């Protein structure tokens, strides 16, 4: 269609071309949805596997054509119109239209917002210098890969999963890596202390210079390019490039402007419905009614919420209750998480971290909430059932590796 | 041509030409079977590409399951003796004619 004034109508418009958006489209067809579907994606590529960006793609171990979530012809065969390279800038829930930054208007019967998040940007002086990179999109990663061969000294800002995964890749190709974290441990927002200390030790043993409790005050330049990172301590760390991984901001602006509720992300009910009529929200943007209301940034959450929303659109109202899981690969370490540790009041370490195969079990009021399992798929698999049943188990028994988790008796009280 | 036959959950059998060198998971996904979620993208972190090897061509061999694969499969309620994670099975000419069933969703 021509940009400008014409309005094209779809029975379902999906905003976002990541795991959530693509699974919504696929699940709608699987559920028998026969109406027209448009998927509007901000990036020019067909939907692809984002977690590989900070792992195998950055390491050059996986080519992009192996990262497509579905093959190109899948979308045509399912009669899903892909409208790529477009940002949705406005939602009008009364007129039931969305507008893109190209000035196009699309009207919808049902709208599914799966726009994900944008990297949280560094805001200190110098943060817009050449040589500062993020890892969120293929374009981000390609820009980084372009200069990587000529960069030896890399400073990573942020000790979350993306920063740590990137650090592992950079060390494996022989770069000098310094990782700067503002808090007193890496992964502070997502994992318990034993996990943080384990990863700090592993990265340090492989030569990563980890700086905890270190705020960044500015980035300094030489000839217009970043050349060092200035810390609050007064120290400056030389850098050929800087990679920033300090979280994401949910891409919910247009939906919020249209009146959707939610302080951080968009509030959704058990069927992924927002407070606006016939507008759903799934994935990184969606704020679940769990605890004080949380967003879950994971492939599993995006995929399973998308299925929930698609079913609801097709009239099958099945509340979202999927078991959360997540993974991170660093060096030869495979971490698998099951459950959400939100609100835990104690942790049990099962196995010796020095053996590089162990698990951390999170408990609340004596019940199992979640597990982080390092090189221990058996605990991960068996732990799922403990999380599912909120099992109450004597902590000493949980820590006893002579018995498998599935063989441990529950506390009878 | 090296062919792969896939039985979907409704029992229908579909055959297509496989891409040599890609995993069976990638082949099944690329052929458009949307029942196979393969959520982790093939890095052995989930079990959402669980399949049954229904028929293996004579003289063909599959790689032995790693401990990690076996453990992940043990977590499935639908595990059978012929269960595999399709991301762990590279496809080559010797496997032409293989028949794969997509396991039920856990």
Image (tube, coloured by chain):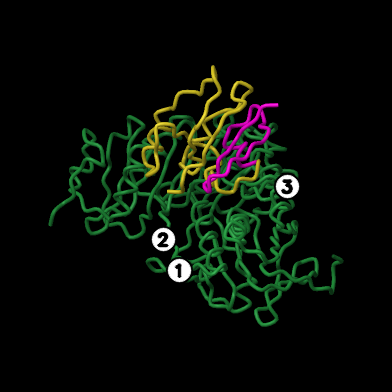
Q: Tell me, yes or no, whether dots 2 and 1 are on the same chain.
A: yes
Q: Is residue A123 visible?
A: no
Residue at left 70%, top 47%? A139
Mark with earlier residue (2, 1): 1
Residue A187 visible? The answer is yes
Element at label 3: helix
Q: Position of residue A94 (x, y in %)?
A: 66, 82
> Callout 3 environment at 10 Å: few (<14), some (14 to 19), or many (20+)?
few
| In the rendered image, the vertical position of residue B17 relative to residue B60, given as above or below | below
What x and y, as percent, mark residue A360?
Answer: 32, 44
Of badges 3 and 2, the one in the foreground is 3
Q: CA distance from mark 3 to mark 2?
A: 32 Å
Residue A250: horizontal and vertical position, in percent? Answer: 57, 63
Chain letter, disc 2 residue = A
Q: Which chain is green?
A: A
| Picture mark count | 3
Q: Are marks 3 and 2 in contact (CB under 8 Å)?
A: no
Q: Earlier in the sequence, mark 3 or mark 2?
A: 3
Residue A321's disc number:
2
What span is colored magenta in the figure? B1-30
Between the residue at mark 3 and the residue at mark 1, the CA separation in whole angstroms equals 33 Å
């Amino acid at each position: 269609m021509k940009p400008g004034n014409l309005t094209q109508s779809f029975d379902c418009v999906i905003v976002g071309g990541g795991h959530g958006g693509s699974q919504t489209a696929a699940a709608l067809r699987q559920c028998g949805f026969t109406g027209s579907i448009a998927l509007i994606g901000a990036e020019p590529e067909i939907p692809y596997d984002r977690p590989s960006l900070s792992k195998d793609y950055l390491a050059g171990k996986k080519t992009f054509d192996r990262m497509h979530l579905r093959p190109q012809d899948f979308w045509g065969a399912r009669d899903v119109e892909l409208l790529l390279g477009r940002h949705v800038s406005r939602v009008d829930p009364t007129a039931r239209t969305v507008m893109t930054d190209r000035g196009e208007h699309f009207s919808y019967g049902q709208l599914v917002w799966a726009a994900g998040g944008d990297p949280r940007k560094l805001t200190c002086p110098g943060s817009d210098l050449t040589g500062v990179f993020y890892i969120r999109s293929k374009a981000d990663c390609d820009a980084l890969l372009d200069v990587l061969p000529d960069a030896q000294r890399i400073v990573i800002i942020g000790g979350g999963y993306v920063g740590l995964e990137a650090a592992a890749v950079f060390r494996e190709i022989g770069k000098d890596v310094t990782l700067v974290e503002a808090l007193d441990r890496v992964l502070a927002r997502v994992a318990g202390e034993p996990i943080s200390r384990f990863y700090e030790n592993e990265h340090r043993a492989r030569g990563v210079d980890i700086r905890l409790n270190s705020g960044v005050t500015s980035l300094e330049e030489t000839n217009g390019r970043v050349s060092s990172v200035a810390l609050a301590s007064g120290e400056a760390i030389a850098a050929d490039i800087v990679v920033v991984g300090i979280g994401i901001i949910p891409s919910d602006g247009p939906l919020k402007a249209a009146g959707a509720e939610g302080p951080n992300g968009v509030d959704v009910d058990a069927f992924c419905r927002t407070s606006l009529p016939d507008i759903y929200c799934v994935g990184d943007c969606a704020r679940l009614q769990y605890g004080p209301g949380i967003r879950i940034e994971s492939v599993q959450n995006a995929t399973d919420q998308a299925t929930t929303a698609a079913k609801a659109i097709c009239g099958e109202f099945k509340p979202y209750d999927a078991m959360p899981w997540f993974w991170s690969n660093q060096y030869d370490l495979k971490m698998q998480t099951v459950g959400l540790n939100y609100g835990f009041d104690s942790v049990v370490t099962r196995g010796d971290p020095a053996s590089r195969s162990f698990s951390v079990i999170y408990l609340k009021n004596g019940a199992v909430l979640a597990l982080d399992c390092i090189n221990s798929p058996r605990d991960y698999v068996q732990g799922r059932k403990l999380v599912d049943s909120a099992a109450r188990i004597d902590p000493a028994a949980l820590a006893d590796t002579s018995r498998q988790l599935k063989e441990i008796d529950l506390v009878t009280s | 041509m090296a062919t792969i036959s896939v039985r979907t959950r409704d029992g229908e059998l579909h055959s297509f030409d496989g891409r040599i060198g890609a995993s069976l998971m990638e082949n099944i996904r690329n052929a458009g079977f949307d029942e196979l979620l393969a959520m982790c993208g093939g890095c052995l972190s989930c079990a959402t590409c669980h399949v049954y090897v229904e028929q293996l061509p004579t003289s063909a061999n599959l790689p032995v399951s790693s401990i990690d694969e076996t453990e992940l499969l043990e977590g499935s309620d639908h595990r059978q003796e012929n269960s595999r994670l399709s991301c762990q099975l590279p496809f080559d000419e010797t496997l032409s004619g293989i028949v794969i069933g997509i396991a039920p969703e856990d």
